Amino acid sequence: MGMTITEKILAEHADLKRVEPGEIVNAKIDVAMVHEVLGIRVAAMLREAGVNKVWDPEKIVALLDHWVPAPNVEAAEIHKICRSFAKEHKIKYWYDMRAGICHLVLPEKGHVRPGELIVGSDSHTTTHGAFGAFATGVGATDMAIVLATGKLWFKVPSTIKIVIDGRLPEMVTAKDVILHVIGTLGVEGANYKAVEFYGDTIQALSVDGRMTLCNMSVEMGAKAAIIEPDQKTIEYVKSRTNKPFKVVKADKDAEYEEIINFDVSKLEPQVAKPHSLENVVPVSEVEKTPIDQVFIGSCTNGKLEDLEIAAKILRNRKVHPDVRLIVIPASYEIYLKALKKGIIETIIKAGGVVCNPTCGPCIGGHLGVLGNEEVCVSTGSRNFIGRMGSKTSLIYLASPATAAASAIEGEIADPRKYAG
């Protein structure tokens, strides 16, 4: 019996010929990413353990992205600890707050390559599976172990194969696809499973779209989400790094726990209603819901492709006077490209507010916190109670296209009317 991509990567990094689901392995890490949690807990853990030297300062990527610039004294102190740690341990890839949100920065800066084992101090590290890597989020204790030793134990997950076919209708995007998948499988539908995406829809998606799919797979409990590398993947990675990499593909006789098929050729724009990713419905079921704020950004949908489709809808139109539109590019590279393309100007002329790259409103940190009973259409990844501020606020998750259309109309709107 053959192996899945996940099994092959974990076996190689554990120096084993093969592994089986449920097996415990101790694997070597290729890249470790750490953000503010470094200053919140990890640095203190290493100090208390007497670790005065990290395993490899060239395999650690560290940055600040959740609360930047620091909105309060507490965040400022956390940032100080991170900066001190990076300097003390001579972390080569220390980006401070000058790069953007971690999940976009890593591939942009060439830190993600097919076949690698990547861990990050954030659950949405699954994003990097879009490049054929096994990438997963870990807690502070596990991250401290990785920074000290370069290894971490894993329970080999079983793999679900998700096959998505069909040409997406206009104004229906990767975000709609993954919302539909999560709404179908449920928030525990892939709990501690690896997910491999296949199908002609996946092949047609851009690199941006593939990252959106893998990013949100954690919302159905996935330990990792992987898209088999193709020419798009290889060209992107080679344009970002000259380091060698190995493309890993599943064996033809790989054993999957389950194979699930989707046809998205007639998919409508999707919306996840409060307060769960399971509450996914077609936009037609929630149209005309009055809103107070629209947020376009986050690691899920702050990419260039996301800003482009929003700007296409907003061009020569105005944001509804009762709506606050907040747009945040996910990285400075994206921000600069959006500036050159006139996207930022379009958003501002429409009445939107553009902020510096940061997680910001998505985690209720700053730059768009919701007040009591306020309603927001967000392109972020989660709509839990209190996620973006007040516990009585309501978050509807949607694509950048649906978000932009809603900003114009002052209520949840179908973006397909703005097609063409």
Image (tube, rainbow, N blue to C red):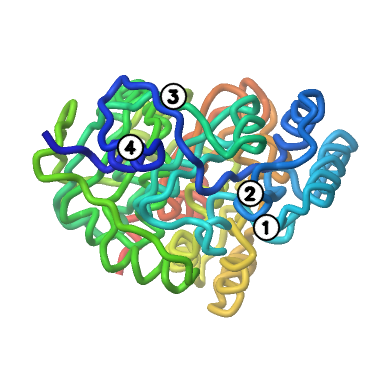
**Mark with earlier residue (2, 1):** 2
What is the spatial separation of the Cα atoms under label 1 and label 3, in whole angstroms?
A: 36 Å
Q: Which residue is mark 1?
A: 93
What is the spatial separation of the Cα atoms under label 2 and label 4, in whole angstroms?
A: 22 Å
**Mark with earlier residue (2, 3):** 2
Judged from the image, the secondary structure of the residue bearing numbered disc 1 is strand
**Mark with earlier residue (3, 4):** 4
The location of residue 372, given as percent across then percent down, is 67, 25
Q: Which mark is residue 11?
A: 4
Residues at discs 2 and 1 in contact (Cβ within 8 Å)? yes
Q: Which residue is mark 2?
A: 60
Q: Which residue is mark 3?
A: 276
The amino acid type found where label 2 is placed reads: Ile
Q: Is residue 266 visible?
A: no
The amino acid type found where label 1 is placed reads: Tyr
User: 360 or 110: which is nearer to us?
Assistant: 110
- Residue 351 falls in image quadrant: bottom right
Q: Tell me: 231 left or right of 349.
A: left
Q: Tell me: 101 left or right of 237.
A: right
- Residue 327 falls in image quadrant: bottom right
